[in-house]
Image (cartoon, rainbow, N blue to C red):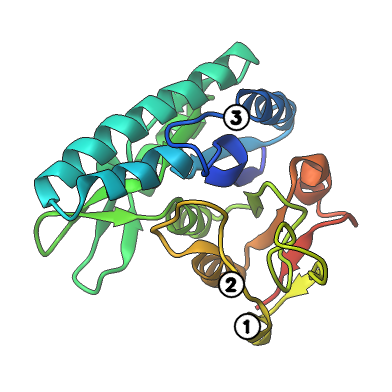
Amino acid sequence: MHRLIVVKLGGSLITDKQRPLSLRREALASVSREMAEICESRRLVIVHGGGSFGHFAVLRAAGSRSKLVEEVRYWMTQLNLEVVRTLRERGVPAVGLPPIALAVLDGEGLCRVDAELVSWLLEAGLVPVTHGGLVRAEAGGLEIVSGDTLASELAVRLGAEALIYLMDVDGVYTSDPRAGEGARLLKVVTPRSLDTIRGSSSGMDVTGGIRLKLMEALRAARSGVRVALGGVRELRAMVEGVEGRYTIVKP
């Protein structure tokens, strides 16, 4: 059976976080073509961020819990449909899977996913496509979980060969490379690297930015998953685990 790859599509990659509800259609089409090639040799699970859809919805709710559920579920469903449609147009057998049906927060606030459901879809030859958003909490109610967290948990629970965080930049930098000169690409990130990294995701972000992403990447790496972060141009290198211009994570 083909080995498994979990790919997290960053919200900044597939949407324009500076413009509410704005999809980067060319970038999504390019990513989808790459996903179709990966499917020829690997099983695949895709998780996408909320970008200008999910984060805008949270801000729009303005602190109202009932409004939060309404806005996040609606706009993230719209984004998931766009992602699934584009993948299907490129030949990927994608199936949308809302996080509320996939994951739960346990009593300690840790995210737990229904690995059996995802495994069944994979065995059927399908590509599950889920996203950050609302999940059930054992303590009651609903909570927002980042796509970065879901991707890490899926990779660990499913025993993935690799977890790839696909970004709109070449990898992890010492500071935001879009903010000016002086940013240096880190080829390797370890727990000691966290104190040297400054900045966060561009535009609207309410789920933790680059630091949460790296914490989740390190968690997966500690469980034996090969983890890489980088841009679309280096996706094949990251899948195969060969040298390239991207960041790898070591525990």
**Residue toward you, 99 or 205:** 205
Work out whether residue 131 or residue 53 is closer to the camera in this orientation and state it.
53
Which quadrant: the C terminus? bottom right
Measured in 3D between alpha carbons, the distance from the residue under mark 1 to the one under mark 2, in whole angstroms, is: 7 Å
Residue 46: x and y in percent read 53, 39
**Number of numbered discs present?**
3
Few, some or many C-alpha atoms within 10 Å of disc 1 (few <14, some 14-19, many ≥20)?
few
- Reply above or below: 66 against 225: above
In this view, 194 is above or below 112: below
Residue count near mark 3 (Cα–Cα under 10 Å), binned few <14, some 14–19, many ≥20: some
Q: Read off the residue under disc 1.
A: 191
- Residue 53, located in which quarter of the rendered image? top left
Tell me which residue sits at (82%, 66%) in the image.
Answer: 181
Quarter of the picture holding the N terminus: top right
Residue 183, how many percent across, how many down?
Answer: 79, 69
Disc 2: which residue:
218
- Give the mark, 3 or 2, whose residue is nearer the N terminus: 3
Mark-to-mark CA distance, 3 and 1: 32 Å
Q: Mark 3–mark 1 contact, CB under 8 Å?
A: no
Type of the residue with mark 2: Leu
Q: Is residue 195 above or below residue 181?
A: below
